[in-house]
Amino acid sequence: MKTIENKKINIPGEIKKYSDLIMLCVKNPSQGGLDILEMRKRIKVIDIIEKGGKSFDFEDADFECIKECVGNMRWVFPHKEIINFVDYISNNGKSNIPAKN
């Protein structure tokens, strides 16, 4: 089980929280589209996000779906908040990323 905080972010436009970025990534199909199994996985994540809240609890498989979607996302503009979000998800929902030596 992984808990993701629904952090507020400062990106111009309609993206105001981490949940908005997760939805953007999950609703963005890969280049070849979605098969039914992938669609079911993503809809399960969407259902959890649509309930709203300050944080979200995801089963490990659901969180892996999010990580894959975030990792495959192609962003249309550079922004530090996006980098922070991707790092947060890549680091399994932990804000502090250990320094690399």
Image (cartoon, rainbow, N blue to C red):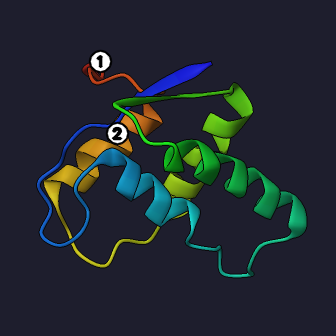
Q: Is residue 83 left or right of residue 26?
A: left
Q: Which residue is mark 1?
A: 98
Quarter containing the N terminus: top right
The x and y percentages for residue 32 are: 74, 81
22 to 39, vertically: above or below: above
Q: Is residue 74 left or right of residue 61?
A: left
- Circle 1 — which element? loop
Q: Earlier in the sequence, mark 1 or mark 2?
A: 2
User: Split into 4 quadrants, where in the image is the C terminus?
Assistant: top left
Compared across the picture, whether 17 is left or right of 86 comes to left
- What residue lies at 65% left-to-right and 73% top-to-bottom? 30
Residue in the foreground of this view, choosing between 56 and 92: 56
Mark 2, residue position = 87
Amino acid carrying mark 2 in the image: Asp
Above-or-below relation of 81 to 72: above
Res. 95 image quadrant = top left
* Residue type of the residue flagged with mark 1: Pro
Relative height, residue 62 to residue 45 (above, below): above
Residue at 19% across, 51% down = 81
Q: Residue 33 at x, y = what percent?
A: 74, 79
In the rendered structure, are the residues bearing label 1 and label 2 in contact, judged by CB atoms less than 8 Å apart?
no
Q: Position of residue 10 (x, y in %)?
A: 11, 54
Decide which of 38, 40 is in the foreground and name it: 40
In whole angstroms, how far apart are the C-alphas of marks 1 and 2? 11 Å
Q: Name the residue: 24% across, 20% down.
A: 99
Q: Position of residue 88 (x, y in %)?
A: 35, 35
Question: Which quadrant of the figure has residue 54?
Answer: top left
The residue located at (57%, 46%) in the rendering is 66
In the rendered image of this protein, does residue 77 appear above or below residue 19? below
Mark 1 or 2, closer to the camera: 2
Q: Is residue 24 left or right of residue 12?
A: right
Q: Which mark is residue 1?
A: none
